[in-house]
Each structure stands twice: as structure tokens, then as C-alpha cells.
Image: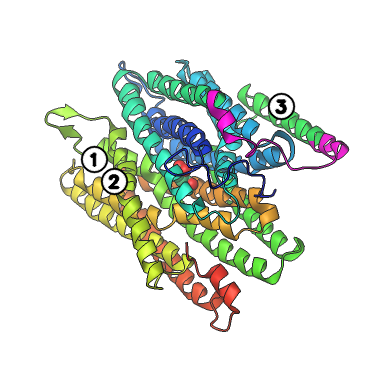
């Protein structure tokens, strides 16, 4: 898909100095993330919640619930890949986003039905809808700008703000309603939030002009063939899902999650190799692809810690943390506010630091930034080791431990996530950009499944089992950070021609 289908030009500064269409995408993403994070914060709490009279949970074991959480997060991001393909080849990105948003809302409303039988159906809808929306909306952001428009990266930064304003809203509303009134009210609130996003998108999508309106140009008969393939795949998926829901086969969540993590890793590896060997890339594109593969590894490891905010860390908050503020017990999910609020505070500061370092020619290469992100993730879990030790002596512990952990993770996120998105937008081979975004989200998928698996291991035997798992993660994060630093030194050979050097130096 080409980046050059642009309706807006540099004269368009209708939204914070950016093309007015960014406002439409900003608000849609904000509502989608409100629903995603709001619901996600409830998920493990609901599944592992005791079967009490007030607000009964499902009473499932940690291992099982955390594995389901991991599969859910992994599936959400994995589905971005077929979602990108559908938009590129058949639907166009605008329609994909609209349909995705509607299916997500349907999913949350299904979860709002207060019976256990519709739980998985609701999750499946959210997974499928997010697959259509999440990657494609990020692609349209890029399409608002001409190739040489310098505003693109700050456009992504503004977009990242939408994500975090949305998640703050989600934690605020869904956690309060879900934990204090009833789980299904929280899920319903997520559905209402997403519905605002749908209406808003319908009314303001004309502001996007032609950006992401049409799929890739191709001959009609070829498109018809692809559409037929898509319909058959959807049909097969439908049969598999419905027969599973009707109980014709059953899945052992933990085993499924483990196999899913291998599957995702193999898919990503094969795809990178395919692009490298058979996609007809020139030497600069190949070099950039190696760089992006390195970033991919760093990102997958990073998300495996980050996504434990709604798994192991959420349970630590619920079971071992004192949540009272002036006598009021805050909802467990409110502690997760720390992340988006810190993002909004620190994102401009980090952007300023990178710009300043760029000016004095000291901007670190991308893998170094990613290594820093991983090191911060490792340190955040060192903080948790202290918290766990303290909790073993005198639980509950203060909230400051989790807040400090989230602060460090947020700093890590800011050295990795917005930069990774912009790097994939900038250094991907242009004709593969949609699929490359898919790959970027595959890193999140792997991270998500691992978060569920690690979270399950950590909580398997209450407090006792946490430290060994966190210790293991800390070692791995540091090791991968070190490998990234060493490899970045390798791919940045000093005798590179200037243009190539610029292409991989990470001057974002
Ligand atoms: N917080 C970001 C978002 O929600 C990134 C999440 C991810 O890629 N795992 O978009």
C-alpha cells in the first residue's frame, strides 16, 4: 500500500497544527482505548473474583484466568494482521475502522449481559473488532501526511496522547462501575464509550478526505478472488468459534496460551525472513528490516512486562496493597491511572530530550533507546521485588510501590512505544507498510500472551511464587537490552554510505 494517497496538504492545520482529519482519528482512538483498557482492567479481577453475594466473580484459578487474559491480549493484537490485510485489499482503512468500532461495541455489550455463557462470545467480538480497528487507524494517521511532511512524527505523538486520555477515562469509569456496582456495568460502560466513538467517526469521517478511503488499486477479478478467500476464511472461523462455544471441543487455557506464544513467534520469524529473502528489497531496505526486527524483539519483551499491569500487578494491588485514600477504598483499577497520567506528563519532556539530543548530534540509535526501555522495565520489577518482600512481612503495603513501578514502566514505554510506531512508519519498505504495522502489533501480541503466562506463574502460589518469576524476568530484560546494544553496534558500521547511515541512525 502506498503512503501517497493523501488528501490533506501542509496548508491543512485544522487540529493542533495538524490535518483536521487527525481530530477524527484522535477521538475514535480515544474512545476505543477507553473501552479496551477499561474492560481489560476488570477482566482478571472478574475471572478470579470470589463467588460472593455482592458482585460475584467467576471464581477461576489464577493460572487459568491469567492464561485467558494472555490469550485475549495476544489475540487482540494478532488479529491486527488479518485486519490490515482486509483493509489493504478489500475494505479500505476507513471502512475497516468503522466496522471494527461497531463490532467492539457489540462485544462490550455482550459482556454486559450478566451471565457467564456469553463471556467468551463478548471477548471474541472485541478481539475481532480491535483487529479491524487498531492497526488500520494507525495507518490512516500516516496517510494524512505527504511523504516529506515533517509533522508526521509529532502527529503520532498527539495520537499517543489520545490512547492515554482514553485509558484514563476507561480506568476511571469502568473500574468504578465494575468493581463498586457490578462487573457487567463496567463492561456496559466500555460499550457506551465505544458507541460514542462510532457515532463520532460516522459524523466526522469526511474530514479524513481520501486518506485510507480505498483499498489498494487492483484488477476487479483479482479483488473478487481475494474477497472470496476472505469470505471462506471467515466462514471457517465462524464454524470453529461457534462449535467451541457450543462445547463441541474444549480448550485448556494454559496449554493453548503456551502454544499460541510459539505460534506467534514462528509467524513473526517466518514473515521477517520472507520479507528479507523474497520480497525484492534493496540493500537499504534490508538493512532497515534488520533494524526493525531488532526493535521487534525488544518490543515483545517489553510488553510482556508492561501488560502485567492488568494481570499480576492488578492482583498484587487487590490482595496485598492498601487501597484506602482518606478512608475510601479506591477501585483496584484506579492504580493503573498512574501509567497514562505519567505518559501525558512525561511524553513532551521525552520528546524534548530527543529533539535536544538530536540537535547536538547525540540522539541515541533506536536499539539503544529500546534497550533503555527494557532496562527501565527490569528496574520496575526490581521495585516490585522489594514490595513483595515487604508484603511477606506485613501486607498490605502502600500504593507507592506500584506507583513507582508504573512510573518506571512509563518512562520505558516512552523510550520505546511511540518511537517504535514512528520507526515502523518511517523505515518499513513502503509497499509493505500495512503488513509492517501488523508485525509491529505482533510484538504486542507475543508480549500479551507472555504477560498472561508469566502472571499465572507468578501468582500460582500466592506471594511465594512471585519473586522467582519477577527475578527471571529482570534477568531476561537486562540480557535482551545488552544484546540490543551489542547488535546495534554491529549494524551501525562506520563505513556505511551516508544515506544508509542516516536511515538507521534513529534520528526521529
Ligand atoms: N499503550 C499503547 C496502546 O494501547 C501500546 C500498547 C501495545 O502496543 N501493546 O496503543
Q: What residue is shown at x 70% (from left), y 37% (from top)?
A: 214
Judging by the rendered image, the residue that carries numbered circle 2 is 463
Residue 469 x/y as whole percent: 37, 54
The alpha-carbon separation of the residues under discs 2 and 1 comes to 9 Å
Q: Identify the element where label 2 is drawn.
A: helix
Q: Which mark is residue 320?
A: 1
- Residue 434 sits above or below residue 375 on the image: above
Q: Identify the element where label 3 is drawn.
A: helix
Foreground mark, 2 or 3, reads 3
Q: Which mark is residue 239?
A: 3
Give the quarter of the image for residue 358.
bottom left
- Residue 254 sits above or below residue 466 on the image: above
| Callout 3: CB less than 8 Å from ligand 1 | no
Magenta region: 203-226
- Residue 388 sits above or below residue 322 on the image: below
Q: Of callouts 2 and 3, which one flags the residue occurring earlier in the amino acid sequence? A: 3
Q: Of callouts 2 and 1, which one flags the residue occurring earlier in the amino acid sequence? A: 1
Within-10-Å neighbours for mark 2: few <14, some 14–19, many 20+: some
Residue 455 visible? The answer is: no
Judging depth in this view, the residue of 56 and 166 nearest the camera is 166
Residue 272 visible? The answer is: yes
Residue 334 x/y as whole percent: 28, 34
Amino acid at each position: 500500500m502506498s503512503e501517497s494517497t493523501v488528501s490533506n496538504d501542509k496548508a491543512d492545520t485544522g487540529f493542533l497544527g495538524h490535518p483536521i482529519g487527525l481530530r477524527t482519528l484522535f477521538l475514535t482512538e480515544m474512545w476505543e482505548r477507553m473501552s479496551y483498557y477499561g474492560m481489560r482492567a476488570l477482566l482478571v479481577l472478574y475471572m478470579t473474583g470470589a463467588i460472593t453475594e455482592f458482585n460475584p466473580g467467576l471464581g477461576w484459578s489464577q493460572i487459568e484466568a491469567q492464561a485467558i487474559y494472555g490469550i485475549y491480549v495476544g489475540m487482540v493484537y494478532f488479529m491486527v494482521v488479518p485486519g490490515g490485510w482486509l483493509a489493504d485489499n478489500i475494505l479500505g482503512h476507513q471502512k475497516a475502522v468503522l466496522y471494527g468500532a461497531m463490532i467492539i461495541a457489540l462485544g462490550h455489550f455482550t459482556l454486559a449481559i450478566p451471565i457467564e455463557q456469553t463471556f467468551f462470545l463478548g471477548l471474541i467480538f472485541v478481539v475481532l473488532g480491535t483487529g479491524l480497528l487498531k492497526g488500520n487507524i494507525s495507518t490512516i494517521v500516516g496517510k494524512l501526511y505527504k511523504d516529506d511532511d515533517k509533522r508526521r512524527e509529532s502527529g503520532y505523538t498527539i495520537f499517543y496522547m489520545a490512547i492515554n486520555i482514553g485509558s484514563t477515562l476507561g480506568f476511571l469509569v469502568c473500574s468504578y462501575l465494575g468493581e463498586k456496582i457490578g462487573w457487567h456495568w463496567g463492561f456496559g460502560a466500555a460499550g457506551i464509550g465505544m458507541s460514542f466513538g462510532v457515532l463520532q467517526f460516522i459524523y466526522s469521517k469526511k474530514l479524513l478526505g481520501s486518506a485510507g478511503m480505498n483499498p489498494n488499486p487492483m484488477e476487479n477479478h483479482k479483488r473478487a478472488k481475494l474477497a472470496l478467500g476472505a469470505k471462506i476464511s471467515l466462514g471457517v472461523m465462524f464454524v470453529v468459534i461457534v462449535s467451541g462455544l457450543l462445547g463441541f471441543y474444549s480448550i485448556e487455557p494454559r496449554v493453548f496460551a503456551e502454544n499460541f506464544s510459539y505460534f506467534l513467534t514462528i509467524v513473526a520469524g517466518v514473515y521477517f525472513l520472507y520479507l528479507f529473502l523474497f520480497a525484492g528489497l534493496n540493500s537499504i531496505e534490508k538493512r532497515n528490516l534488520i533494524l526493525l526486527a531488532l526493535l521487534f524483539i525488544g518490543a515483545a519483551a517489553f510488553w510482556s512486562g508492561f501488560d502485567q499491569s492488568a494481570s499480576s500487578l492488578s492482583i498484587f494491588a487487590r490482595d496485598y496493597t492498601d487501597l484506602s485514600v482518606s478512608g475510601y477504598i479506591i477501585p483496584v483499577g484506579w492504580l493503573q491511572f498512574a501509567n497514562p497520567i505519567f505518559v501525558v506528563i512525561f511524553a513532551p519532556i521525552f520528546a524534548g530530550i530527543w529533539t535536544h539530543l538530536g540537535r547536538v548530534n547525540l540522539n541515541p540509535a533506536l536499539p539503544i533507546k529500546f534497550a533503555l526501555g527494557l532496562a527501565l522495565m527490569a528496574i520496575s520489577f526490581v521495585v516490585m521485588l522489594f514490595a513483595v518482600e515487604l508484603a511477606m512481612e506485613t501486607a498490605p503495603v502502600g500504593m507507592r510501590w506500584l506507583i513507582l513501578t508504573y512510573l518506571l514502566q512509563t518512562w520505558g514505554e516512552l523510550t520505546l512505544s511511540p518511537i517504535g510506531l514512528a520507526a515502523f512508519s518511517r523505515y518499513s519498505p513502503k509497499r509493505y507498510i500495512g503488513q509492517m504495522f501488523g508485525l509491529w502489533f505482533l510484538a504486542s501480541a507475543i508480549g500479551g500472551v507472555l504477560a498472561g503466562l508469566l502472571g499465572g506463574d507468578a501468582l500460582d502460589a500466592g506471594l511465594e511464587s512471585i519473586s522467582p518469576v519477577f527475578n527471571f524476568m529482570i534477568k531476561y530484560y537486562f540480557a535482551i537490552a545488552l544484546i540490543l546494544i551489542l547488535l546495534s553496534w554491529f549494524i551501525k558500521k562506520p563505513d556505511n554510505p551516508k544515506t544508509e547511515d542516516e536511515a538507521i541512525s534513529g534520528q526521529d
